[in-house]
Amino acid sequence: MKKLILPLLIISATAFGQTKLRPSIDKKASEIETKVIEWRRDIHQNPELGNQEVRTAKKIADHLRSLGIEVTENVAVTGVVGVLKGGKPGPTVALRADMDALPVSERVDLPFKSTVTATYNGQQTGVMHACGHDTHVAILMGVAEILASMKDQLQGNVKFIFQPAEEGIYEPGVTSWGAKQMVEQGVMKDVDAIFGLHISSQTEVGKIGYRSGPAQAAVDNLEIIVHGTQAHGASPWSGVDPVVTASQILTGLQTILSRSVNVTQNPAVVTVGAIHGGIRHNIIPEKVEMIGTIRTFGEDQQDLVHRRITEIATNIAESAGARAEVNITKLYPSTVNDPDLTAKMVSTLEAAAGKENVRVNPPVTGAEDFSFYQREKPGLFIGLGGMKKGGDPTKTPSHHTPDFYIDESGFILGLRVMSYFVVDFMGMQK
């Protein structure tokens, strides 16, 4: 019996040795909260599109170096990676923040409102942090400062990953960006676990949401080209109408969700966002192009949906005497929180936010390229509240919109939970 008790006591003491750093984390987080908000406002006012985050990257690199952290720049184009070596041996814990903004013109009346413009997809557009990546960067810069102040007490190393192009980039022929390219360049090779967060404009400040297993959808681009035979609109029988065929395919695609997918397990989405065909009111065109997005959870469901799209499109086209060409491009896999890691870290979430402020989220059909890191090592991705207290999520502007707004009072919880992740995980490894 004594042989059993002694190891348990050692494990408990080791875990407590790191957990007892929480009060120091809380104190430091309160001290730098104002600084973190100032960083966020500066980044918000100076947004940069994917793979163009030069100013943001320099701000990050300069800050990390000032803390004595080893810095590597120009990773995956503009990415920054910092390594903080703890005073004691242990695992390497990675923390990730994304840096890029969106081609959105800001409407929110703020002193630090973005007035930046850029060319995107051949068009002049405003640029805005309309998804909160400015928040993610500022919080992780703050976490780096907190943990650097106690590095001698850390039982392991911390890798800070500041990633470009989470939203993707518009460059024909480019198929690797953001997290995928960071992984390809080796940032995960020496990592034992990775953690990340995403601010939510429709979750109240002080709240944290998480989900074990598949949490966010895989995203794929869909293109269907329907080839027919051009004819005069007054004599449709002399050709093969790709417009009518495309409309039948569009209707047929909806049966995938209602008849092929087991929606009691996970949702799925097949959306056609644009249809292009023809140039004149009395000419049946030669072809019609359809583009859209596919959202699925898990590879089995993804394979099923892809197969059914191809079957429906090609068979409906064939029955009309037309031909359908289906092209599906896989972008981000499903964001899957490691069940074992998630179970271990629930107590960390509750310690940071209070048990009553932690909830299990439903699956989210939005996508996140954090999923590429999770394919390499166990990872946990959580949601952080950014809506003002008492706000109505049904009336609050959503992400990727000109009116997107974040309540900065929620940042301090982000500082605490990300720092807690590091020290708690390190304590669990002994």
Image (spheres, rainbow, N blue to C red):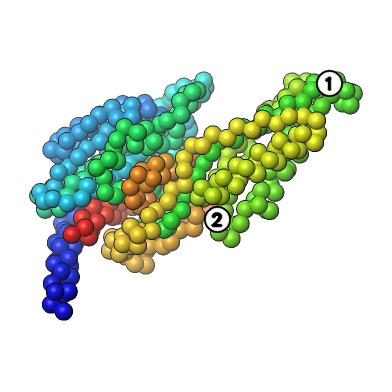
Q: Left or right: 91 with respect to 40?
A: left
Image quadrant of residue 313? top right
Answer few, some or many: residues within 10 Å of disc 2's Cα (few below 14, many 20 plus, some between 14 and 19): some
**Disc 2 on helix, strand or loop?**
loop
**Marks 2 & 1, CB-CB < 8 Å contact:** no
Residue 18: percent from left, percent from top: 17, 59
Quadrant of res 358 = bottom left
Residue 292 rendering spot, x and y as whole percentages: 60, 36
Q: Observer-nearest residue: 211 or 256?
A: 256
Residue farthest along the bottom direction in this orientation: 1
The quarter of the displayed image where residue 58 is located: top left
Query: Is the C terminus in the top left, top right, bottom left or bottom right quadrant?
Result: bottom left
Residue 330 to residue 149: above or below: above
Amino acid type at circle 2 is Asn
Tell me what residue is drawn at x 33 percent, y 51 percent.
378
Of residues 227 and 421, the one drawn nearer to the viewer in this rendering:
227
Q: Give the residue pinned by disc 1.
A: 231
Q: Position of residue 50 (x, y in %)?
A: 40, 30
